[in-house]
Image (cartoon, rainbow, N blue to C red):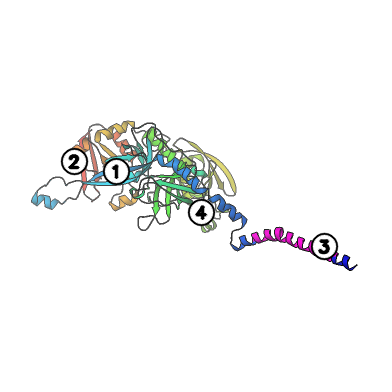
Amino acid sequence: MKTKFLISVFFVALIGSLSALWIHTHWMAEHSTIKSQVLSDTPTSKLVGLTKSTEDPAHFSAAAEKALPCVVHIKTTSTANNLSYDPFTEFFFGYHGKPAPQIQQGSGSGVIISADGYVVTNNHVINGSDKIEVTLNDKRHFEAEVIGVDASTDIALLKLKAQDLPFIIYGNSDAVRIGEWVLAVGNPFNLYNTVTAGIISAKGRNNIINSSQRAIESFIQTDAAVNPGNSGGALVNLNGELIGINTAIASNNGAYQGYAFAVPVNIVKKIVRDLAEFGTVQRAYLGINIQDIDAKFAEDKNLSRLKGIYVNGLIQGGSADVSGIQAGDVIIRIEDAEVNTVSELQEQISRYRPGDAVKVSLVRGKKEIQISVTLKTLDNTTKLSKTSSSKAVFDELGIECQELDTETLKAMQLQNGVQVYKLKPGKLTQIGIQKGFVITAIDRKKIESLEDLKSALQFKKGMITLEGAYPNGMRATYSFPL
């Protein structure tokens, strides 16, 4: 009996020991692992994220390999003259001839967008240049021709005499999301073929670089490192597709301090098409005065929602006016794109030409309605501008001109004018005009834009008189036959 009892105790103890061993091996080991993840602040979900991130460097490499051959280095050369003029010195000591020119050089980046040599860059990279030299990723050199520039978006289109070039594929800037990885590709500080990585920090940023009322700024903001020399370079997604042209940085010292801004590629595409086809941008306008909506403004205007853009007023005879939009309406969509800031609305409208019809969704009172609007120019027409006839006149004069923003004009104590930023052999060089001259009037007709200049010159015959001023304040008048 005693032997049976001892055997039973032995087996019970054995079973208990085996059970304890199984529990320790399976259940306790599993929970020990979970506890260690909690203590190290690396739960399973975070471990999965960390594992995935180890693939990112390879993904960056693939995108960089696609983009690098398509990004070029741009070197510019310009000649600056000392335009100071002292009438007393000339009166007493005579005229001593033209001052010696000073050679200035600059640099930036550009992006090849077609196999036959079209390159997009920033207007400020090539502005005022006499010569533009482009160096490809494979170290070939080309002299570039300026096809057209657009100061409002700071975009310029160049052309190289080359074929079968590598070119970048357009992405869709509407589809990019805040927090998405991006690469900035360019030539900062003349460090060729530099790639930096970051994320998209914000979209629709405005009032960054251009104070002109006609400026179109709806920048993609990124924290990828961008420095002087990156301007005009590519902002690409992880597929190596172009989503923006790097244009500006937020900085107190001129170098990168955490934030950079790029023109969205969906704006760039339209600007490039216009410049290639017409030599100028076909800009359309809704013809409205608008402002953003915040909580206080919504309360003051008794608005039921904070989304959308408030219509303060309309330009008589403009696109919105003749289409039935009213002051007090709140625009919420252009076509299928929601708009909640002035910059977002401007970005959407900038993609269309005069004569295009767009669907505008708005809230009037408490009712949502949709109106079809045919877009017009500032002159309330739907005509497209062509530069072919006026280009011949510009070639004869030997000038290339650009519009100036209100701050620049104010600093020069001028109310209007367009500036001669490049001179070539022609009539104006023969009569002594210098680069930098701002044309304020032609035959006493005020010149406020490039369109005004083209209109004044297009069919002009006989004597012509240019009035204007130089940046140092010296005013001048030139008369010559055309």
Choose between 465 and 135: the one closer to the eye: 135
**Residue type (three-letter) at the residue carrying disc 3:** Phe
At label 1, counting other C-alpha atoms closer than 10 Å, the crowd grade (few under 14, some 14-19, many 20 or more) is many
Name the residue at 33% across, 32% down.
161
Nearer to us: label 4 or label 3: 3
Classify residue 371 by image quadrant.
top right
Q: Which mark is residue 293?
A: 4
Q: Crowding at label 4, few (<14), some or many (≥20) Cα neighbours within 10 Å?
A: many
Q: Which residue is mark 1?
A: 76
Above or below, 116 relative to 346:
above
In space, the residues marked 2 and 3 are separated at their CA atoms by 116 Å
The reply to whether residue 437 is visible in this rendering is: no
- Closer to the chain start, of discs 4 and 2, is 4
- Is residue 429 visible from the viewing direction of this image? yes
* Contact, mark 2 vs mark 1 (Cβ under 8 Å): no
In this view, 167 is above or below 436: above
Q: Earlier in the sequence, mark 1 or mark 4?
A: 1
Q: Is residue 232 left or right of residue 48?
A: left
Reading the image, the residue beneath label 2 is 432
Position of the C terminus, as image quadrant, is top left
Among the two numbered marks 2 and 1 on one chain, the one whose residue lies closer to the N terminus: 1
Q: Earlier in the sequence, mark 1 or mark 3?
A: 3
Nearest to N terminus: mark 2 or mark 3? 3
Magenta segment's dominant SS is helix
Residue 203 is covered by the magenta coloring: no
Element on which disc 2 rests: loop
Amino acid at the residue labelled 4: Ile
Q: Which residues are magenta?
A: 7-34
**Which-is-in-front pick, marks 1 and 3?**
3
Residue lying furthest front: 3
In terms of secondary structure, where does tag 1 sit? strand
